Structures are given as C-alpha cells and as structure tokens.
Amino acid sequence: MSFMMSSLVGMCARRINKQLLTHNVPVVKQLVRNLEVHEHMAHTLLRKAGIPTPPFSVAKTPDEAARLAKDLDTKDLVLKAQVLAGGRGKGQFKDSNVSGVEMCDTPEQVKELAESMIGKVLVTKQTGAAGKICNSVMVTARMFPRREYYIAVMLERTFDGAVIIVSKQGGVNIEDVAAANPEAVAYVPINVNEGLTSAQASSIVDKLGLTGHSKEIASLVVSSLYKLFVEKDALLLEINPFAEDICGEYYALDCKCKFDDSADFRQKELFALKDTTQMDPKEVAAEKYNLNYIALDGNIGCMVNGAGLAMATMDIIKLYGGAPANFLDVGGTATVETVTEGFKILSSDPNVEAILVNIFGGIMKCDIIAQGIIDATKQLDLKVPIIARLQGTNVVKAKQLILDAKLKVISVDDFAQAAETSVKLALMMNIAKSSNLDITFSPKSPKEKDSKKVKN
C-alpha cells in the first residue's frame, strides 16, 4: 500500500501473518488497491464537511509556495511534501538532508525548502529505496496542540461493517497505543441501516473525556466524519490528531483517506483526484485496459484470471521455493487486445525470469489468452521461458493456436508441475544471469517444422 493505515487492521494482519509463518504457511501480499488522496485533498474534504482544519494551500512551484506562505501572514509555517506515503517527517529527499515535513519561519525559507522538494524524490520507510516523486507541497500554519485525540471511521470485517475508533492518545501510531494499552482505544460499531445516532455520537465523545462546549464540537466532528464516510464510499477516514490548541480551538491536523475502487462509477469527482504519478507505471497501464496488476518482489511473472486463482498460484510458487515478481489478473471479459497489452506489461518487469500463465477458462476463453500470447510475442523480443497451464473453455483450440504459431511455450496441464517448472526455469535463468551466460528462451521458433494437430 502507498501508506500505512494507522489503524488496528495493520496490527491484526501482522499478528495473523506471524501465526501463519510459524506454521510454515506461505503469506502473500494482499491483492487490494483502493483510491488514496493527498493530504491537502483530504483536508479539503474535511472542510467541506464542516470539520475545522488549519489554514492551508497547495503549491506546485517554489515561487507559488512562497506567495502562499506570505498570504498566511504568520511566522509559524509548515511545509509538507504531498507524497502518498507514511513517515514523511522521518523521510528524506534524495541528494539532500531535507525531510518530507519542514518547519519554516519566513516565505523565503519556504521557497528555499520547496526547491528541495518539488520535482524531487522522497524516500521513507514505506516507499522503499526507490522513493516517490513529490509534485506539490502543502503550505499550512503551524499549530501548537495542548491535547491530541484520535478519531477514525473505517470499514472493518471484524465488526461486519463500519466502526468508529477513538482514543485519548492521539498524535502517535494508534497501533502502538493499542498494543501497549488496549483499554485506551474504544470501538463503536455502527449499524449501516440505522446510521450513527446522536446517542452513539455522545457516547463516543464521552470516551474521549470531553465535556461542555468541547463535547459539542467533538460530537459534531464525529457525526460529520461518519456522514462524509458514507457519502464518499470511504473505507477509511482517519483524523490523527484531532487537537485542541493553546487557545482552546479544535482542528483536524492530519487526515488519511481510502476510498472503495468499486464506487468509482458514482464518485467521478473524487476519483478524478487520483494521482497516477504515485503509482507503478505498470499499474497505470493495466488500469487503462481494465486489468489488475500487482507488483511483488520475486522473479516469476504470473498471468491468471481471478483473484482466487492468483492467490493460489502465488501460494504454490512459494511452496516450491519460488517468488512471484508480479501478477496480472485478466478477469473474465478480456479481449485478445487487452490480453496482448497485459502480457506486455507483465514481461516489462526487468526482474521477471520466467512467466507462468495459469488460466482456468470459464467465462474467459483459453483461445483468447493463447491469441494474446501469440500477438504479444510477435511484438516483443522475449528472452524468458513461458510456462502455460490452460484448462477449461476452448483449451484444445488454444493449444492448437500456440502450436500453429510455432511458439516455444512449455505447456503443462498439472498445476503443481507448472509451478515447479516455473521455479526451476527461473532459478536457471537467474544462475545464468549471475554467471553472465547467454541463455535465451525465445518463444519464437520460425524454423520449427509444422507440429501435429492436437487431439481431444
């Protein structure tokens, strides 16, 4: 994920993974991709919902950042890199000692720091060594919190729906709070049919220990946040911290949001905010053709149809000692063109040393996959082995197409054998690469004699 959800979901997932690992069960990356928006966009959503935030603006150039800082008319300024990754304050831009969050005193200092941020790559614990590009910065007034709280609404399977999570200990990682003192975190499940009641909102604020006018403000914030959660098809709206400043005013100082990709058809304005520069270019290309691409860190590319088969494919690859480099789910309605483009995306990963095509033809027909592979190999100079396990609708026709095209594709019917073959060939290619040996498994074989027809 682009940044960590500071919620108990991450902690629970790690505990489950730990238990699985102790029993030697392969654990794979979660195949979920949801819309994330930049901090300034999240603050804009909060403001429109009536939730107070510090004054802020967003700049795409150093000069604009300086002008906006001057407009704020304060000596207490904060410059925040707009990058979809957690840990920005502890991160650092490449080739400089500038972090993703910097305190400033003057517009001139804002401009100087913005020059080290805009157009540069920020590296944090969550981005990995590659980092992420920063195309804009948020200029905001620095607040001085006296008390900090945690308020979030999220969709959680454990509660069969939405749950509001609050804590008196805001401003820090909520996972750490829950681990050290579980009683410090309160959960209030919300019935989706009834919605958040005024009694529940009042009860939630009581758990924060607020009274009087402060309680009224917090109750309004909780109600507004839940309303926004429902209206925008959100999966997570997290304010951390919700703070009281030294003047007794309350503000949402930071907000993280995730939205359900399945709702893009009715959230057009929201999904128009998607920043594709923060995504893997291969994921962007896959989305263009309605394909699902997930990058992993192994060396075996996987083309499958259906998330369930994708998980099973990656599990069995791991079982035989291999590691998936990525997976591309062509779904059930792909055309020859989209399969061809998908194969190009899959093979463009420089870490891929073997490709396993694992298709169970139901709605998705095997011959369409086969033709896509054929068309792709005509356009690409592939030098890695392709292992194809095709089963189901039109499988005989698919195999004949591959034979007639004279492709050097290794056809394996057994699932386990296909995975084992992929692992062995990827290992061989890796050894050859390390030893500077030239081993080519080109799928093209124009000089081969015509193959015999496939029998049913």
Image (cartoon, rainbow, N blue to C red):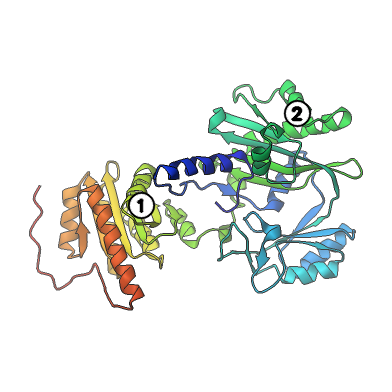
Q: Position of residue 260 (x, y in %)?
A: 55, 41
Q: Nearer the observer, disc 1 or disc 2?
A: 1
- Place of residue 77 in the rendered image (x, y in percent of width and height, measured from the top left): 83, 59
Against 155, is 45 above or below?
below
Residue visible at 62% across and 36% down in the picture: 154
Seen in the picture, residue 298 relative to 205 is either above or below; the reply is below
Q: At 59% across and 56% down in the image, what residue appears? A: 126
Mark 1 surroundings within 10 Å by alpha-carbon count, few (fewer than 14), some (14 through 19), many (20 or more): many
Query: What x and y, as percent, mark residue 425?
Result: 27, 63
Left or right of 204? Residue 263 is left
The residue type indicated by label 2 comes to Lys
The answer to whether any part of residue 373 appears in the image is no
Residue drawn 26% across and 44% down? 361
**Element type at marker 2?**
helix
Q: Is residue 215 above or below residue 432?
A: above
Side (left or right) of 190 relative to 294: right
Q: Which amino acid lies under the numbered mark 1 shown in the image of this protein?
A: Lys
Q: Which residue is mark 1?
A: 318
Q: Quadrant of residue 97?
A: bottom right
- Secondary structure found at label 1: helix
Up-down relation of residue 306 to residue 288 (above or below): above
| Sequence order check, earlier mark of 1 and 2 | 2
Q: Which residue is mark 2?
A: 207
Q: CA distance from mark 1 to mark 2?
A: 45 Å
Residue 390, given in percent of the width and then of the height, sits at 23, 50
For the question of whether residue 413 can be seen, the reply is yes
